[in-house]
């Protein structure tokens, strides 16, 4: 090879542009994944708030019934969570004062940031809260 042909192969003017583009791509993917992680945390926080409010009602009423379940769905709806995607279980009504009442809510959060790269990821969101029944039930 001649000296001029060797100069073409040693020229590195385009390396900085390519490196910059790859760096921008990696930063954009990390930013999108960070937004998904924040969305997961937000959904868990909203679900915990709805469970906290529902547990307060359950402690007063000594358990979970259809009316309290409806209130739970209203709490979710107010916070912008689809109640159809959340499953809730709890201690049935009419436990005695001082007995444990529990509510458990579960849903799935799908991570949307990696979907263009061909990866479909989802993470479960589970909240479990416990408290003591407050009223004495006469039978």
Image (tube, rainbow, N blue to C red):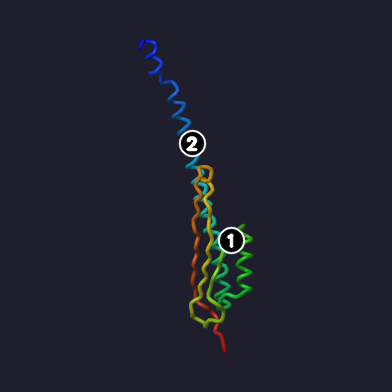
The image shows residue 25 at horizontal and vertical percentages of 49, 36
Residue in the image at 53% along x and 75% along y: 91
Describe residue 84's horizontal placement relative to residue 21 as left or right.
right
Give the secondary structure at mark 1. helix
Residue under label 2: 25
Q: Are marks 1 and 2 in contact (CB under 8 Å)?
A: no
Residue toward you, 120 or 79: 120
What percent of the width, then of the height, locates residue 15? 43, 25
Above-or-below relation of 82 to 38: below
Determine the residue located farthest toward the bottom in the rendered image: 139
- At 43% from the left edge and 20% from the top edge, which residue is drawn? 13
Residue 116: image location, x then y, percent: 53, 43
Which image quarter holds the N terminus? top left
Secondary structure at numbered mark 2: helix
Q: Nearer the viewer, residue 123 or 95?
A: 123
Q: Quadrant of the C terminus?
A: bottom right
Please name the residue that numbered disc 1 is placed on: 85
Of mark 1 and mark 2, the one earlier in the sequence is 2
């Amino acid at each position: 090879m001649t000296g001029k042909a060797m100069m073409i192969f040693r020229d590195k003017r385009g390396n900085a542009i390519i490196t910059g583009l790859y760096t921008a791509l990696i930063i954009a993917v990390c930013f999108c994944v960070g937004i998904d992680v924040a969305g997961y945390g937000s959904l868990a926080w909203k679900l915990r708030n709805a469970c906290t409010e529902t547990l307060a009602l359950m402690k007063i009423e000594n358990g979970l019934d259809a009316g309290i379940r409806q209130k739970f769905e209203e709490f979710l709806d107010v916070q912008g969570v689809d109640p159809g995607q959340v499953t809730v279980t709890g201690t049935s009504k009419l436990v005695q004062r001082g007995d444990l009442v529990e509510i458990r809510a579960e849903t799935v959060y799908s991570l949307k940031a990696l979907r263009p790269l061909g990866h479909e990821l989802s993470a479960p969101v589970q909240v479990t809260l416990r408290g003591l029944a407050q009223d004495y039930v006469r039978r």
